[in-house]
Image (cartoon, helix red, strand yellow):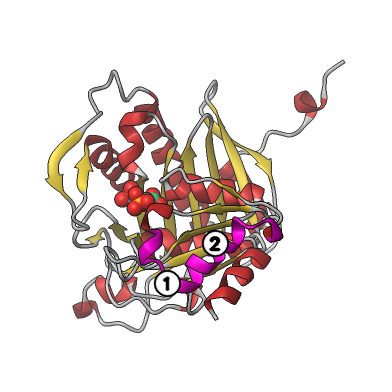
Amino acid sequence: MPNESMTKPIVTIVQHIREKQRAFPTATGDLSWILSGIALATRIIQSYVRRAGIADVLGEVGTTNVQGELVQKLDIVANETILRCLGYRDIVGIMVSEEDDEPTIVKSPTGQGKYIVLFDPLDGSSNIDVNVSIGTIFSVLRCRDDLPESEGATPHCLQPGVKQVAAGYVVYGSSTVLAYTTGNGVHMFTLDPSFGAFVLHTENIRMPDQGKMYSVNEAYLDSFPSGVQDYLAWAKTPESGGYGLRYIGSLVSDFHRTLLKGGVFMYPPTAKNPDGKLRLLYEANPLSFIAEQAGGAATDFKQRVLERQPDSLHARTPLLMGSKSEVERVMGFMN
Ligand code: AHM
Ligand code: MG
């Protein structure tokens, strides 16, 4: 007798997005083309991640990136893989990476290249050498049609997160998981390594509305805003009902757990990073879009992340996201 997993239809990510788009007769199929490029790139990246110790891709390169962080060999491999997999897709106009100073113009943003792909090629890369889950985060915007060619690429990219047409992430963990949204819920896929395809495992993921788990680097406690300190003190009291702490130090992995199990993730302003550490365009915006699409919330402790107008490509932001009621609870302490 075949069991249920033997009879369930196998749906890949490209099939899935095509089927979803069928509900919109005017959809062009562009996003499925972009997502298939991202799926290809992340399959290649995961193959390097899985062989990191034997493929001579472990360790630092000896330089720092535009963010002032040490560049790992795998950062470069991941960055180049994404540029190579997406750069030739005719509808991609601009690609912007957390690792690069400037956007890469692939096609005229006022011509055929109508989409912008922004990405953090390997998030959590300081964890690479110690075999902890890392990931790739991406965001897709449409190029603006009100800008002259002479403006260059940057003004096209400086759009608030509400303008995203798609976003997603991949976690290279105990399995490789991809989650995406195009504004119609969040859908999750697992890479089947035996035949190399991302296969749908859950549609319309919902983030639990509550969760007794907080995720923050508490080593910086003394320089957090007083409201955050008060929340963290309260969470340790018996009145709170007992909270747990989980902090991996790879945003994408901490977010993935928060999406599935509930709770809050936060990276508040600190003395070292008064504007927060995480990048608005490559990290906070795509994950906030996913959080909201799954029924959660995301704020910079002052306003909805997705409504922030970025003032530079590598702008940073404080970040608080997760289960709606838990985000509201933290904000209650802030006020
Ligand atoms: P990066 O690896 O792309 O540079 O990302 C920054 C990482 C995030 O993944 C993570 O949430 C954060 O930095 C951890 O910072 P800290 O070590 O200060 O807790
Ligand atoms: Mg990152």
Whole-angstrom CA distance, mark 2 to mark 1, is 13 Å
Which quadrant would the C terminus be assigned to in this image?
bottom right
Amino acid beneath label 2: Ala
Which residue is outermost to the right? 1
Q: Residue at x 44, y 50 (%)?
A: 251
Could you say where residue 289 lies in the image, as x and y percent from the top left? 54, 64
- Viewer-nearest of discs 2 and 1: 2
Which residue is outermost to the top? 1
Q: Characterize the magenta stretch by its predominant secondary structure.
A: helix
Q: Residue at x 57, y 46 (%)?
A: 257
Amino acid beneath label 1: Pro
Task: Specify which label sits upstream in the sequence, 2 or 1.
Answer: 1
Q: Which residues are magenta?
A: 221-239
The answer to if 232 sits in the magenta stretch is: yes
Which quadrant would the N terminus be assigned to in this image?
top right
Can residue 49 be seen from the camera position used here? yes
Q: On the image, numbered disc 2 is attached to which residue?
A: 233
Q: On the image, numbered disc 1 is attached to which residue?
A: 225
Is 323 rendered above or below residue 133?
below
